[in-house]
Image: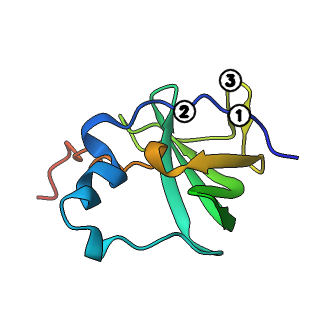
Amino acid sequence: MHKHVEWDDPGHDSVIEYYAKDPNEYARPYAGCILSARFQGKVVRIKVAAYVEDTSIGDVVALIDPSNGGRLNSLGKLSLGDTVRLPDEYRAFEPPKPEDDEDDD
């Protein structure tokens, strides 16, 4: 059974909106793909096991704080290993990695 998740709106990072400009380039997810979404401001990576009716079903394989790249084991009611459903409209591109402030001199 999957865990119900209220995904964050992907906003300007929406995969669907990006590919709406050129639908010929859009590829449907398949088993083994890693997709990203947002939950409570964090990045969630999901490994797809199945794709049914514009929804990916898979396990949470990473929870990432985009502000520092730190990894989490859980976030609210969501934990690594949970099986979730991710509708296409909530898929999101990942934000750029934070810049390293240290100089390599």
What amino acid does circle 3 point to?
A: Gly
Q: Is residue 38 above or below residue 86?
A: above
**Label 3 – label 2 distance at C-alpha:** 12 Å
Q: Secondary structure at mark 2?
A: loop
Residue at point 27%, 76% (across, down): 24
Residue at point 68%, 47% (across, down): 85
The reply to whether residue 93 is in sight is: no
Residue lying farthest right?
1
What amino acid does circle 1 point to?
A: Leu
Task: Pick whichever, 67 or 92, lies toward us.
Answer: 92
Which of the 4 image quadrants contains residue 74?
top right
Name the residue tied to disc 2.
Answer: 7
Name the residue tied to disc 3.
Answer: 76
Residue at point 81%, 45% (across, down): 2
**Label 1 – label 3 distance at C-alpha:** 6 Å
Q: Position of residue 105 (x, y in %)?
A: 11, 58
In the rendered view, does 27 fall on the left or right side of 11? Answer: right
Q: Position of residue 49 (x, y in %)?
A: 72, 68
Q: Secondary structure at mark 1?
A: strand
Q: Disc 3 or 2, which lies upstream in sequence?
A: 2
Q: Is residue 59 above or below residue 102?
A: below
In the rendered view, does 28 fall on the left or right side of 10? Answer: right
Q: Disc 2 or 1, which lies upstream in sequence?
A: 2
Residue at point 39%, 39% (across, down): 66
Q: Position of residue 13 (x, y in %)?
A: 29, 44
Which of the 4 image quadrants contains residue 12?
top left
Name the residue tied to disc 1.
Answer: 78
Nearer mark to the viewer, of 2 and 1: 2
Query: How many marks on residues?
Result: 3
Q: Are marks 1 and 3 in contact (CB under 8 Å)?
A: yes
